[in-house]
Image: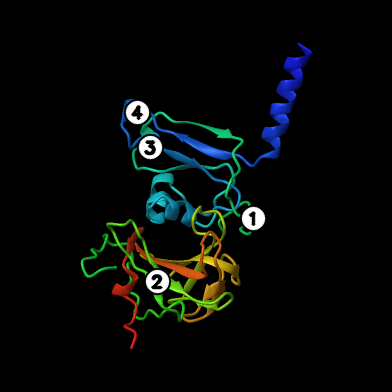
Amino acid sequence: MYRNLLTLSLLVFMVSCAKPTTVTIIDQSVGSNRGIYHIVQRGESLYSIAWANGLDYRDLVKWNKLKNPDLITVGQKIMMSSTASRGSTRSFSTSAKSKSSGSANSTNGKASSSIKKRGNTGSKKIKRWQWPAAGKIVDYYSVAKGKKGIDISGSLGSPVRAASSGMVVYAGTGLRGYGKLVILKHSSDYLSAYAHNSSIIVHEGDSVSSGQKIALMGQSESKEVKLHFEIRYDGKPINPLSVLPKRK
């Protein structure tokens, strides 16, 4: 009896010391696209959740009837599909270490030529894009290879600049594989991301101008110093070279 109590106490201690990682359960009895939801973790924003799952943040706003996409709270349940509310859902936490960032506020988150407009959503075409870094492209966008953006080489600490004016909607380390990441919102349709930075200069909620320095190049979660750069339209990756100006 004493041994069982000691083991139970040790397990409780280990779980309490580890940051919880939400495990999502899909109820197969009601369809594979139903019953999916995400529990907001410390350091996440609605934009980072949408980005990590290849979704449009506006869909999350609609499905969850959110009045303000910048105001979500730790522990809040976010439905991840339009039919989720009709499905049966369960979730639980494990003691696995979380990749959530501590840089964001803990209570809020404070296209190609064939792109189609999505109704009357105030879509806006960005008039001018600029290169986010001055280095050479070392890896290209590829649907076949699952490459969602381009990689630009550089030296440690060289400037990373906003590819267009916008607002910082995420700045942190909560997305696995991106390291220190900045996400900018340029319009209701366009977002851009800047990954593997050595340090982030801006903060969530900041307004930035085109060409403004937002981070310093690094190699977080990468074997070499480089910037991984993505542009998404309606939540879907597009080839950055389709909108960036041609280099001479």
Residue type at tag 4: Gln
The percent position of residue 163, horizontal first and vertical second, equals 43, 76
The answer to the question of whether label 3 and label 1 lie on touching residues, with beta carbons closer than 8 A, is no
Q: Secondary structure at mark 4?
A: helix
- Residue at image position (54%, 77%) is 155
The answer to the question of whether label 3 and label 4 lie on touching residues, with beta carbons closer than 8 A, is no
- Residue at image position (38%, 79%) is 129
Relative to 171, is 52 on the left or the right?
Answer: left
- Which circle, 2 or 3, is nearer the viewer? 2
Pointer 2 or 4: first along the chain: 4
Pointer 2 or 3: first along the chain: 3
Residue under numbered circle 4: 28
Marker disc for residue 138: 2
Q: Secondary structure at mark 1?
A: loop
Residue under numbered circle 1: 102
Q: Residue furthest right?
A: 2
Between the residue at mark 3 and the residue at mark 4, the CA separation in whole angstroms equals: 12 Å
Identify which residue, 139 or 111, lies in the foreground. Answer: 139
Residue type at tag 2: Val
Residue under numbered circle 3: 84
Which part of the image, by quadrant, shows the C terminus? bottom left
Quadrant of residue 150 within the rendered picture: bottom left
Q: Secondary structure at mark 2?
A: strand
The percent position of residue 110, horizontal first and vertical second, equals 57, 59
Between the residue at mark 2 and the residue at mark 3, the CA separation in whole angstroms equals: 40 Å
Q: Secondary structure at mark 3?
A: helix
- Which circle, 2 or 4, is nearer the viewer? 2
Pointer 3 or 1: first along the chain: 3
Residue type at tag 3: Ala
Between the residue at mark 2 and the residue at mark 4, the CA separation in whole angstroms equals: 42 Å
Pointer 4 or 1: first along the chain: 4
Q: Count neighbours of disc 3 (C-alpha within 10 A) and say few if under 14, some if 14 to 19, many if 20 or more.
A: many
